[in-house]
Image: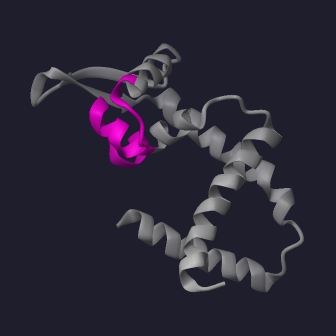
Amino acid sequence: MNRSDVIGSLVLSGYALGRIAAQDAGNDAPAAQWRVLSLLEQAGPQRVGALAVSARTTQPGMTRLIGGLEREGLVLRSPDPDDSRAIVVDITPAGTAAIAAWRVEFRETLAPHFADLSEDDWAALTRAAEILALRAAD
């Protein structure tokens, strides 16, 4: 596999692992829900439009998703202190707890798929995860 193929393979494999974890766990929450909660947890309060761009969806679609998350008590909408015409969305303590529980479920569901890896393979995955986390933070 050449270098450019490695990057694409990592991205596609990551998506596939996410689908496998959701299916194996029977988690019927949309992936977009977890993506939005993760974005809010990592970046803090954001306008709906900025969330839509980050999540690669439309603003109307994000508005609908935020409405559902708000009804579940996972996010809170409030006026933007810099522009009262705009709305800012923030994660609630319940949202933080939900994303933490989902991450545990995700890890536990995928663990059996990796149970037979050697120490060398774990070292390689650990290093790859460190590199990917650094690149994603850029």
Outermost residue on the right side: it is 116
Q: Is residue 135 above or below residue 95?
A: below
User: On the picture, is 26 further left or further right than 81?
Assistant: right
The answer to whether residue 46 is magenta is yes
User: On the picture, is 56 further left or further right than 17?
Assistant: left
Q: Which residues are magenta?
A: 39-60
Question: Residue at position x 56%, y 84% from top?
Answer: 3
Q: Is residue 37 above or below residue 8?
A: above
Relative depth, front residue between 91 and 13: 13
Q: Residue 38, how many percent across, how many down?
A: 48, 44
Q: Residue 113, how many percent across, how many down?
A: 84, 60
User: On the picture, is 53 further left or further right than 94?
Assistant: left
Whether residue 47 appears in this view of the structure is: no
Outermost residue on the top side: it is 71
Q: Residue 136, how many percent across, how many down?
A: 43, 64
Q: Quadrant of the C terminus?
A: bottom left
The answer to whether residue 53 is magenta is yes
Q: Quadrant of the N terminus?
A: bottom right
Question: Residue at position x 71%, y 54% from top?
Answer: 17
Question: Residue at position x 49%, y 25% from top?
Answer: 74
Whether residue 4 appears in this view of the structure is: yes
